[in-house]
Image (cartoon, rainbow, N blue to C red):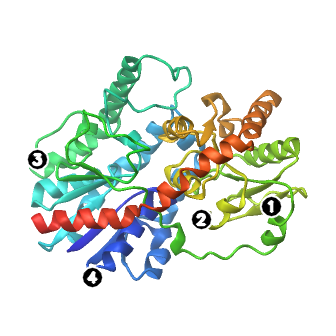
Amino acid sequence: MHAILASLGTDGDVLPFIGLGVALRARAHRVTIVASGQYADLVASHWLEFRELVTSEKMRALLSNADVWHPLKAARHTADWGRNMIAPQYRLLTELAASNDSVLITNPSILAAGLVREKFGRPLITLVLQPWMIPSAIAPPIFHIPGLPLRAPRFLHAIFFRLIEFAADLLVGRELNRLRRSLGLKSVHCILHHWLSRDLVLGMFPDWFGPPQRDWPPQIQLTGFPRLDATVNRSLPPGLHEFLSNRKPTIVFTFGSGMMHGPQLFEAASRICAKLDAQGLFINRFQTPSLPPHMFHATFIPFSEIFPRCAAIVHHGGIGTTAECFAAGKPQLILPLGFDQLDNGIRVKNLGAGLHTPSKHNLVARTKSLHEGDINEITSALSQLLQTSFQTSAARLADRVRSQNGLEAAADALEKFASRR
């Protein structure tokens, strides 16, 4: 089998595909990772083939605009950035899938993969990293939209999802259908109804995090979280071991590998730790803030190495970070910025493993000032997480995560699928 694993995005979007590629290569399959150029060296370090889906510069252009984290502007910004890439992606995937043993394994946003399946009959498998991406009228995805109450009736969330579908057709559908017609394929509408493969969908999360719903597509199989973190360099930055040896509790603050904005995030972290008489570890690869004595900055640390050594984690709610918090058995406070992050935060709270803040605490949008009331509310939430009850509740989930190897389960499902084909 030639597994062609294609994904766009930041670490949380791409690392699961690399991890699955490692698992498949260990089973003697040919693997090609198709992602943005910044991952070429990491892919090469795992002895996998690599093709560039988009340049590092173009990906940086997407993330450098703060609109990518705006709950209303993000869709337009992302669509403007990516709609003209569908045709080049189609040509690249068509080239890679030339052999009959090729299998396309992509995230839902790679719309070109569906065209290759229709045109050439190559099997297509969709990897869904979070339950938020699966449409359901029974348990509709929760969107991070100011003014939309979390406890609103389901039909309001369902109506909003229909608006999302309409916006997707308006922003991307025209370009997609123009390409479809040029390939001799019929136009489609409601493109979000077509972004999950009809062959196989692998939900890369456990059923206790995203319980299957009766109206989910029948081709969905759940595998567990796809944790790659343990395969990368585990060394700590100089001075961090001594910092962690202090008696004060350490709180980690991290807001995603694509966070290029919001120096006020560090200011907030510093003020919150001072109020709690705690010390803070701020992880961000783009910012180099000045450091008061109770704060430590690092550009990167493997989460599986650092989270177990800390008392709590404050993060944006990305699914990869959420899974690593579960695996470490540590309580988490989620400050959602957009996309699936609020939905993940609600699931974390319902499991008793942490808390989330409402959308008004999107600190990335606070480019000029931080309100003392916001800082106090976040401090109060963290104070709850540092109590024994939350520590114990979060610790109960660690064994459930570590006992399930999502990457190996996904590789098993792929091999079974390929054998049937």
- Residue 117's image quarter? bottom left
**Do tag 2 and tag 4 residues touch (Cβ < 8 Å)?**
no
Report the residue marked by disc 4.
Answer: 28
SS at mark 2 in the image: helix
Label 1, label 3: how many angstroms apart (C-alpha)? 55 Å
N-term mark: 1 or 2: 1
- Looking at the image, residue 257 lies above or below residue 385: below
The image shows residue 25 at horizontal and vertical percentages of: 32, 78
Nearer mark to the viewer, of 2 and 4: 2
Label 1, label 2: how many angstroms apart (C-alpha)? 18 Å
Label 4, label 1: how many angstroms apart (C-alpha)? 43 Å
The image shows residue 70 at horizontal and vertical percentages of: 56, 36
Which amino acid does the dot numbered 2 rest on?
Answer: Ser
Question: In this image, 270 relative to 12: left or right?
Answer: right
Which amino acid does the dot numbered 4 rest on?
Answer: Ala
Label 4, label 3: how many angstroms apart (C-alpha)? 35 Å
Q: Residue at image x 40%, y 50%?
A: 206
N-term mark: 3 or 2: 3
